[in-house]
Image (cartoon, rainbow, N blue to C red):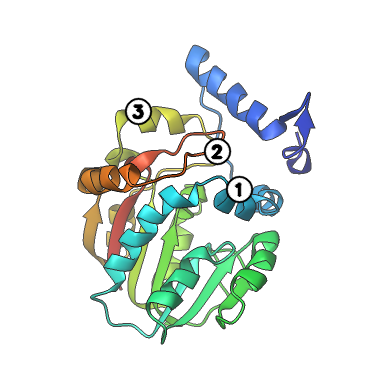
Amino acid sequence: MTSSDYWKKFLGIEVFKIDYYYKWLLYRFLGLELPKLKSQRQYWTERGNSYMNEFMGENYVDREIFFQDILIEQLKPLKFDSLFEAGCGFGWNIKRVKDEFPGTRIGGVDFSVPQLNYSKDYLTGYQAETCHADICSMPLKDNAYDIGISVGVFMNIHASKISEATKEMTRVCKKYIIHLEYDENNTTRELKKKRSFKTNIVSHDYRKLYEALGKEVLQLQTYRDFDKAYAVHVNNLKNKLECWEEFEGPAKYILTVIKV
């Protein structure tokens, strides 16, 4: 199956859903886990054509904003003048940062051209410095930004390349790095099973990765820290999730704050 076929339909069903259930069946009945994707550039080139509409139009954003709020709360006590997002997509997070901290210079890197094209309209008037590039090799100067962030992006980087990505973050960021990413060692048993067969989701030990670079991990929070607040958040939601796949809840990410 080519990537361009992935988003087409077979008998009225999107091929990516068939692919998802095929992998789930292999895991459920045969215990097989297919290799993780070594590169997701083409995957996100294709999915980028529809991701923004899916994200904003299926009430998914009402749930994901819980993690964005956590990010904003982490930023409030920090002193910074600039921030960029590794894997900025169409600009949802950096737009919120600019709204909350108006004087901040914002930027972002992404290798999905369609998403960056969407960001041009979404970030109109925000003077965002976005560019098309791979996180593992960013065309940014050393210490280009005070803070670098990622939300659900580094979990799409293959294990063979993750060290390159973390080294780039420490090169580009002057003060802090904040990740909201997946770590199977700090999630629920249920979610670990649900994600184990997905070839586009990779678990990484962020504390170990950054400590190996001689950096200090200031905070590491998991679903145990998020549970109560998330329950309150969900109870206040009025709109029902319309996405074909359920939202994975507070266990989908851990928070890691690194001092550079």
Instruction: Reply above or below: 231 against 50.
Output: above
Q: Nearer the viewer, residue 74 or 242?
A: 242
Instruction: Reply above or below: 148 against 230.
Output: below
The quarter of the rendered structure image containing the N terminus is top right
Residue, x 28% and y 55% (percent of image)? Answer: 207
| Residue at mark 3 to residue at mark 1: CA–CA distance | 25 Å
Q: Secondary structure at mark 1?
A: helix
Residue 166: x %, y % from top left = 42, 62
Q: Amino acid at mark 1?
A: Glu
| Residue at mark 2 to residue at mark 1: CA–CA distance | 8 Å
Q: Is residue 35 left or right of residue 171?
A: right
Instruction: Reply above or below: 197 against 123.
Output: above
Q: Which residue is mark 1?
A: 54
Q: Which residue is mark 2?
A: 243
Q: Amino acid at mark 3?
A: Glu
Residue 73 appears in view = yes
Residue 220: x %, y % from top left = 24, 55
Counting residues from the N terminus, which is met first, the one under dot 2 or under dot 1?
Answer: 1
Q: Which residue is mark 3?
A: 190
Q: Secondary structure at mark 2?
A: loop
| Residue at mark 2 to residue at mark 3: CA–CA distance | 20 Å
Residue, x 51% and y 82% (percent of image)? Answer: 141
Dot 3 crowding, Cα within 10 Å, few <14, some 14–19, many 20+: few
Residue, x 77% and y 37% (percent of image)? Answer: 8
